Image: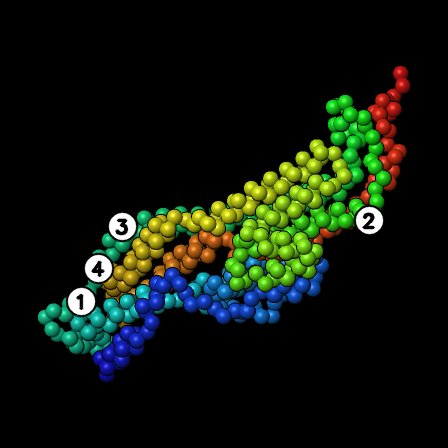
């Protein structure tokens, strides 16, 4: 009976798709593309949070298609939940819903199948005990049939090397994610800086504070400002700032995910001519930066102040180039492949070494769950590194763009505020010097 059961199990295991266990091209998920910004959320443009999309996949889906649904921007409430003393219980209760573990399911199935084969084969050729504890002779008693096994010392000897490879792989991937996030942090900071300076300095073409009098030019107060013209010029600065970061987001995103949304957003916010010029450009972020430079050049302010504004554009070029470097240059492939091959071989052979370590369990059966647990842990570490290595499809770049656009619009809406009493400011510092 036991022999027939094991034979049937072997047939089922052989029919399983183990040939795909270590495939680097998992089957893509048929997930609906993300919707436009207006459909993502009904909240204010200043709000930056994860999309509230009912078409998002459930927690049992994971892979390339679901990366866009894992772009969480934490708020205070989420940090409180993150620090909850119940987090360990909650994490354990959702263990079988973990996307990381599900994504390495084929690999774990392969190593566990090897463990089951070792366990079953050694029972067939070395004898076994039934559930009543009665010992039985080997079913296969051929001379060539031997118990299979490997010395555990060989695995413990190379374990530190494997650990170093995995640690370096994970740390390198996290540094790439952290660097990409810092680049977008610079974008957020300097877009606000650019719009703040443009709004505060608008119309100041030659006052004493911009240095003109030190070059022999006469100092003068701000020229008369047409509110409608000011609103148009500053609106162009805000729009072109948003157009750059939105084009950068599209430049770093998969075309199938973002192209339709990008075109729709550009056409809805920009004039037809501006939208078409950016959309049809070969390098869209560069075109958006050019249009932003033109918008700065049209501002009525001293050229020294325009130079200060243009310094922010140089930083935008740096962040764009840094992100392009991360996207086009992965961790050296020979390192990633060697780590994956080393790890896969080590885990596939591990059951042969674990067999002798579980002699106290019934027919060494505990080697099977032990193999599965070790495989999940180590393959999970490698999977974490793989998911972090390309950071842009898990960063909430759409949220960054929405926040930048909303904040720039708000900053430029303050134009003229706090400057009503400007005429009361003395034109010469000597006018307010104390008399002696």
Q: Which residue is drawn at 17% across and 72% down?
A: 125
**Residue 189 appears in view:** no
N-terminal label among 2 and 4: 4
What residue is drawn where x is 79% and y is 36%? 204
Labelled disc at residue 228: 2
Q: Which numbered disc flags the more N-terminal residue, 3 or 1?
A: 1
Query: Residue 281: x and y, percent?
Result: 58, 52
Question: Helix, strand, or loop for circle 2?
Answer: helix
Q: Which of marks 3 and 2 is nearer the N terminus?
A: 3
Q: Is residue 397 left or right of residue 268?
A: left
Q: Residue at left 38%, top 57%?
A: 378
- Badge 1: few (under 14), some or many (20 or more) residues near its Cα, within 10 Å? some
Residue identifier under label 3: 157
Which residue corresponds to mark 1?
147
Name the foreground residue: 359 vs 103.
103
Neighbours of disc 2 within 10 Å: few (<14), some (14-19), many (20+): few
Q: In which quarter of the image is the C terminus?
A: top right
- Residue at the far top: name it: 436
Is 287 positioned to the left or the right of 29 in the image?
right
Find the distance from the CA under tag 3 to the CA under tag 2.
75 Å
Are dots 4 and 1 in contact, CB under 8 Å? no
Looking at the picture, tell me which residue is in the foreground, 137 or 317.
Answer: 317
Cα separation between marks 2 and 1: 88 Å
């Amino acid at each position: 009976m036991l022999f027939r059961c094991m034979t049937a199990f072997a047939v089922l295991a052989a029919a399983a798709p183990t040939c795909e266990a270590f495939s680097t091209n998992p089957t893509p998920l048929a997930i609906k593309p993300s919707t436009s910004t207006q459909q993502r959320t009904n909240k204010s443009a200043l709000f930056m949070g994860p999309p509230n999309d009912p078409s998002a996949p459930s927690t049992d889906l994971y892979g390339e298609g679901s990366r866009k649904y894992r772009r969480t921007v934490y708020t205070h409430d989420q940090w409180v939940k993150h620090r909850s003393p119940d987090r360990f219980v909650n994490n354990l209760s959702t263990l079988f819903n973990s996307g990381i573990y599900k994504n390495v399911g084929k690999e774990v199935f392969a190593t566990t199948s090897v463990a089951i084969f070792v366990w079953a084969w050694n029972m067939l050729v070395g004898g076994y005990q039934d559930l009543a504890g009665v010992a039985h002779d080997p079913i296969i008693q051929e001379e060539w049939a031997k118990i299979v096994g490997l010395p555990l010392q060989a695995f413990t000897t190379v374990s530190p090397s494997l650990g170093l490879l995995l640690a370096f792989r994970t740390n390198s991937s996290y540094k790439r994610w952290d660097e990409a996030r810092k680049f977008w942090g610079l974008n957020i900071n300097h877009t606000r800086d650019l719009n703040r300076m443009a709004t505060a300095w608008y119309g100041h073409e030659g006052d004493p504070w911009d240095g003109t009098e030190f070059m022999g030019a006469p100092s003068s107060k701000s020229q008369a400002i047409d509110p409608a013209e000011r609103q148009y010029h500053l609106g162009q600065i805000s729009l072109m700032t948003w157009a750059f970061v939105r084009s950068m987001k599209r430049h770093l995103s998969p075309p199938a995910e973002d192209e339709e949304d990008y075109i729709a957003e550009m056409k809805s916010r920009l004039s037809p001519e501006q939208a078409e010029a950016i959309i049809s450009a070969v390098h869209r972020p560069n075109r958006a930066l050019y249009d932003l430079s033109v918008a700065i050049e049209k501002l009525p302010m001293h050229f020294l102040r325009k130079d200060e504004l243009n310094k922010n554009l140089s930083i935008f070029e740096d962040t764009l180039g840094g992100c392009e470097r991360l996207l086009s240059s992965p961790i050296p492939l020979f390192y990633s492949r060697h780590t994956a091959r080393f790890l896969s071989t080590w885990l596939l052979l591990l059951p042969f070494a674990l067999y002798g370590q579980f002699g106290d369990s019934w027919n060494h059966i505990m080697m099977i769950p032990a193999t599965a647990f070790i495989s999940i842990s180590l393959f999970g570490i490698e999977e974490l590194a793989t998911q972090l290595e390309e950071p842009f499809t898990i960063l909430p770049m759409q949220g960054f763009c929405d926040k930048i656009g909303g904040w720039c619009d708000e900053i430029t809406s303050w134009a003229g505020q706090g400057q009503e009493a400007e005429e009361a400011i003395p034109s010469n510092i000597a006018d307010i010097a104390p008399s002696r």
